Image: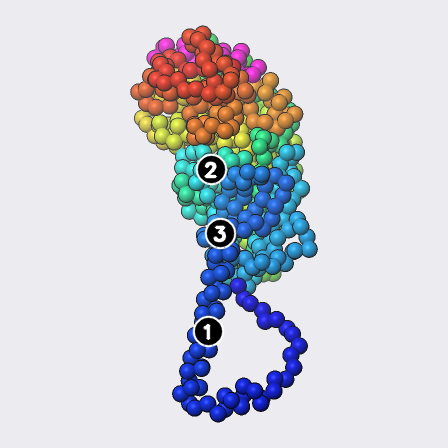
Amino acid sequence: DRTMPLSRRTGQIPESTWTLGFREMTEPWKGAVGCLGVAVFFAMTIGIISWQALEQPPEEWVLRGRDAGMLWERSRGALLLRALPAGRPVLAIAVGSVPATEPPPPRDHCWHDGGQFCYSWEEDAELRLSLEPPATPGTECYGVRWTPLRPDVTLKDCFSMANVSWYGGPSIRAQCWPLNGAESPAQPLVSGDLGTNPDGFGPVLGRYFLGSTGVTVTVAPDVPLLLSLESHQHFCLETPAGRAEPLQYQLCVSADHPARCPTMDFLPRRSPIWRYHGPEGSAAKIRRGLRALVRRLKRLCLQEGVVALGERGTAVLAAADHVPLERRKRQALAPVEPLELSITLSPYVAVASPLFLRSLHGGEATGNWLSRQPRPGGSSIPLLTTWKGQLSTRLNVTSEAALGWFLARARRLRQALGATYVVFEGAEGNSFLEQDVPAPAGLEGDGYTEVLAAALATLGNGTAISAGVRSSHLPLFVQMSPLRSDWSHAGLKGLIPSVLHYSLLGYNFFIPDAVGGSGAGAPPGDQELFVRWLQIVTFLPVMAFGSPPWSCCDAWVLNLTRQCIQRHRDFVVPLLLKYSEEWQSLGYPIFRPAWWLSPTDPAAFTIEDEFLIGDEVLVAPITEKGQVWRDIYLPGEGHLWLDTNTARVFDGGTTLRNYSASLAEVPVFIK
């Protein structure tokens, strides 16, 4: 610390005493006295430094609330959050890109305000901590704001994973639960397509992180941000280089479960989805293929559900979009009755398509599609990108006219093709960020996804979207990313972590990937993988099939599929409806991790292969190839669990070792 000299009034000192005597000293004596003075000065300086080091504690309170407080740890330059009154550690934040080991001075620039603490590292950054209004009752919140004092300062805070399990944040290709096992370099915290960028972040993303110590980290949507994940070490939030942007977030401490935003009411689907993978060369071939699929489903007593047509098949049937609606009504597609039809659209259009060419001739290209200006004051040109291998452009969601046209077209096609449901792909990602082009106002970060989701919600409850960013309050199903057809965390093992991640962020009604996975992986025909996948999907909001059971498996698997569909309709859907009401009123997720009933048991924090439906049903499937037994953790000490397979009752807060589960069985317990 710098020592400021004291200001005081002094009078003149008479020379006749020591100054005259000093003049009369010989040179050797003068040198000796000078050396003695220097020695005394250094001794006093070392003494003062040693006294400061001994007197100043390794941790110093900088801001205290009622239930918690922030401390500064000098040895590693870290902010600590501790719960009061016992001082239980809740969170450690390593401060980066500033001289963190320099101890904050005793003075506080905000000393006049007991609810704030301010400190400035000269020429680097300024830190402001503040007590914030609680987000929900029973919580205490702290605002953290770093402001750079130079444009070349990159602000970076790293949140320790030591003794803390973290949940939330972005979806990733090999989903982990908790997030501690994930690895990612620093990249923009923006949704993306895992199919085209498997090392990026996925289409469902929250700027919300929950720690097992009861702390949450929430970042405002308008803060430009990079996120990095270092497995079992920490995750870091940092500002983009050279932008001189502040880094700000909110910390909240709560002893209760975190509540998420309630959503509007819409229903899980009682019937399964059958994805069409037949011929798509022409409208006639598609109609014949759909009729053949429906006939087979009827013959196998699977005549209930939805037949889903992909984007290419939908485009082929809609190719005559310029045909008057009256004529198209007479050509309306009805080959899927008694099943229902789902069609697929996207905000992309190929530049070689008649739809885009017509917009060029009509002079609407720069208004209907995202555009950029190559140079200031120049003409705007469409922002080109790639979608499913074709050079394309993307709908301009900032134009009310373009958005209105897009929604009207979706309604028209739904009516003309006789579709009950519409799935919108390609909602994720920032096209400007991908090409390193400045985004216009309103489309920074995930602004595009957010605006598009709000517009699509006006189409009604039969609408699904491929992304979820700050849209959990909207009546939209969210289509999960494709998973690999294998047993890895990018395949079957990642399904339950994805379910828990989606539900924690508020997306409780989602459409999981098709049974068996739709991405590349194991060769088709893995009957065991299909069955274990089927057993999990039975307990989710929707059952979706890509490859039908008769194409990969024996007759007994086909019979098992019928049983699972009936169990989903008769047992699971009523359960989901019951807990959707609790979601409405309390904001609690429908699909819950084991620690929901055992919030203080560290053994529950890392369980990624079990999930709860509400508080009363525990599903613990097999996710290892060739395995017919597993350990099962029964959460909730003091509760009793009924095994639906054996009718035996077990105590909560215990682990069943080597529980047997043949290929035809899935362990399910009722509290």
The answer to which image quadrant residue 120 occupies is bottom right
Which residue appears at 45% of the width and 30% of the height? 602
Q: Residues within 10 Å of mark 1 (few under 14, many from 20)?
A: few
Please provide percent x and percent y for residue 617. 51, 17
Q: Is residue 558 rendered to the left or right of residue 242?
A: left
Which residue appears at 61% of the width and 87% of the height? 14
Q: Is residue 323 rendered to the left or right of residue 563?
A: right
- Tag 1's secondary structure? helix
Q: Main secondary structure of the magenta part?
A: helix
Disc 3 and disc 1 in contact, CB within 8 angstroms: no
Looking at the rendered image, the disc whose residue lies closer to the viewer, 2 or 1, is 1
Which residue appears at 64% of the width and 51% of the height? 116
- In the picture, the disc for residue 164 is 2
Please provide percent x and percent y for residue 456. 61, 33
Looking at the picture, which amino acid does disc 1 mark? Val
179, 493: nearer the viewer = 179
On whether residue 218 falls in the magenta region, the answer is no
- In the picture, the disc for residue 602 is none
- Tag 3's secondary structure? loop
Looking at the picture, which amino acid does disc 3 mark? Pro
Q: Which residues are magenta?
A: 553-575
Looking at the picture, which amino acid does disc 2 mark? Val
- The residue pinned by badge 3 equals 58
The answer to which image quadrant residue 178 occupies is top left
Mark 2 or mark 3: name the one nearer the start of the chain: 3
On whether residue 557 falls in the magenta region, the answer is yes
Q: In this figure, which colouring scheme has been used for the structure?
A: rainbow
- The residue pinned by badge 1 equals 40
Query: What's the distance in space between the residues labelled 2 and 1, CA to CA?
Result: 50 Å
